[in-house]
Image (tube, rainbow, N blue to C red):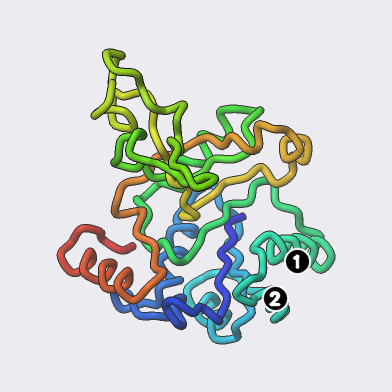
Amino acid sequence: MAWIPARGGSKGLPGKALQDLGGRPVIAHTIAAALESRGVDRVIVNTDSPAIRAAAVEYGAEAPFLRPAGLAADDSPLERALEFQRAWLRDNQGFVADIAVGMSPTYPFRLPGRIDQALDMLAADPNAANVRGMCVLPYPAQGFWGEAGGALALFCAGLVRRPGSAGSAGSAGREGGGNRLYQNLFSFNAVKDNRDDLHRHPRFRLPIVLELTLIESIDLDEPKDLDLARLALEIGLFRPR
């Protein structure tokens, strides 16, 4: 099951799930990516908004419930919305997903076959709990510092290679450097939802990484992000489904 959380009260980019992107609402691009997957049987939109619910159904997804307003505030943890969804589907439809693929509509661009690639990676390892889309940061690890107790310290000290080592300095965190920094994205997160034993295991916190391209990492959080996504479509950097 693919599930798409989309609350109606977005602030940074108001109404972003329903903003026009290439002649369709933003959320329609994520729905299309989920529907094309051979491994996805159901596509659920988890929203508190009747307007988003109507758009979801129009573009082929299910929206069998509206989440309570208390689970759609600015500070509402997404985990609580997911718990509500699991309970509602179990109690009202007797449905429990084997694998749940969370997909944020704020990432409208996914390459064809991306979700099936994640599912194949998950199936290949019986002890894997989840596969997440991540973007490799293009900066060397030694460029990251943090302030602690009024002093600066290396943020990722363990990733910084010593001078003279293979892949030192300029290549750390890049191709061939061996040590990379990843940004976790919610383009998709494929989780073995029926494996509670894995959820309790420390390995659950060590996901399998599926590296995304820069175009896939565009996240619609502010108006300028939507402008960038529209430009990407306009100049042909991405072809919508």
User: Can I make out residue 97 in this image?
Assistant: yes
Viewed as shown, does residue 165 lie left or right of 74?
left
In the image, taking residue 165 as reference, residue 88 lies left or right, namely right
- Say whether residue 226 is left or right of residue 89: left
User: Relative to 180, does residue 24 appear above or below in the rendering?
Assistant: below
Q: Which amino acid does label 2 sit on?
A: Arg
Give the farthest residue toward the front. 150
- Looking at the image, which residue is at 70% across and 76% down? 67
The quarter holding residue 175 reads top left
86 shown above or below 51 = above
- 23 on left or right of 103: left
Quarter of the figure with the C terminus: bottom left
- Location of mark 2 (residue): 67
| Residue 169 location, quadrant | top left
Residue at 69%, 32% in the rendered image: 202
The crowding category of the residue bearing disc 1, from other C-alpha atoms within 10 Å (few below 14, some 14 to 19, many at least 20), is some
Disc 1 to disc 2: CB gap under 8 Å: yes
In the orientation shown, which residue stands out farthest toward the left?
A: 235
Using the image as rendered, state which of residue 10 and residue 161 is in the foreground. Answer: 161
Q: Mark 1 points at which residue?
A: 84
Which image quarter is the N terminus in? Answer: bottom right
Q: In x, y percent, where is residue 218?
A: 34, 59
Type of residue at label 1?
A: Phe
